[in-house]
Image (cartoon, rainbow, N blue to C red):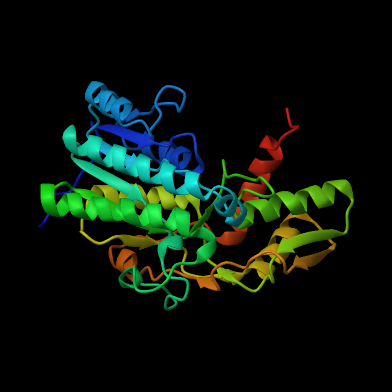
Amino acid sequence: MKRDPFPLAGRRVYVAGHRGMVGSALLRRLARESCTILTARREALDLRDQAAVHRWFEAERPEGVFLAAARVGGIYANAAHPAEFLYDNLAIAANVIEASRRCGVEKLLFLGSSCIYPRLAPQPMPESALLSGPLEPTNEWYAIAKIAGLKLCEAYRRQYGCDFISVMPANLYGPNDNFDLTSGHALAALLAKTDAARREGRDEVEIWGSGRPRREFLHVDDLADAAVFLMKSWSADEPINIGAGSDLSILDLARLIAEIIGFKGRFRFDPSKPDGTPQKLLDCSKLSALGWRPRIGLEEGIRETCEWYRTHRPGQS
């Protein structure tokens, strides 16, 4: 079914999860769209509460929805809280998507994740690789919930004719990331560890696993720009990848962070910690064919993120 463009100007647009890394980036990007931005703090609206979500949608009547709310975290967080990662993300997706249908939301964009691809998917990973093999065990709880969310969007398109779309970004980083040393993602945790080692005069930084896995990193502001671009101009049953176009090993990432931060010490590997998926690089040929490209290089993005972290880390005024 061919869909008309969806200009955002003049529309009421809800960003679910606006205080998180992705949601806050969407707010920054949407500020240029002349739309009315709707948000709801977690204390006022628990997205796991179906009745509360439906009441909020009935009262606020959004016309467009960016579904960026999720329980997120790295390997440790997934392993420590599997029930919360599965239940919370299932509930959030189901409640917001159903409320959007009931209230006649004209367009919804669901944020998936590259971790939903099979552990040994072909590289770079095309959208067609989804559900073609077993998942990576270290993040399967989160991945299953995200797969359910994007399949809900597909099902609602088929049964109800809803213009609900799904995007799958690469590993994200940037302002408002979670820099916790155990629950955060690889780049943010490595940045925090390395910055602490430099400040405290230590000569060693620990890296979980072997350092050999390869990852693709996309600045969250590029993700937000691509999401707005796709919301306005793209519609299809299948999801679409959003990536940076290149990857690097965790060890090379650590070296780049150390160079930017000014850490002169060495790295120590902890083989008792899991590596996760061997490689995650997205095939973004569909998005490239639509005319969108990322603009923030990895070194530039890490420098910017480092400056943000140093200003906002615990203990700073």
| Quadrant of the frame with the N terminus | bottom left
Q: Quadrant of residue 316?
A: top right
| Front residue of this view, candidates 72 and 140 | 140
Residue 7, how many percent across, how many down? 22, 42
Q: Is residue 200 left or right of residue 187?
A: right
When asked about the image quadrant of residue 70, the answer is: top left
When the figure is inspected, residue 40 is found, relative to residue 3, above or below; the finding is above
In front of the other: 290 or 238: 238
Q: Residue at x 44, y 67 (%)?
A: 135
Q: Along the horizontal axis of the image, is 174 left or right of 239?
A: right
Residue at 16% in and 46% down? 162
The residue under the point 38% across, 58% down is 168
Q: Report which quarter residue 258 is drawn in.
A: bottom right
Left or right of residue 267, residue 43 in this image: left
Q: Is residue 263 above or below residue 132?
A: above
Does the image show residue 234?
Answer: no
User: Residue 203, image x and y in percent?
Assistant: 88, 59
Quarter that holds the C terminus: top right
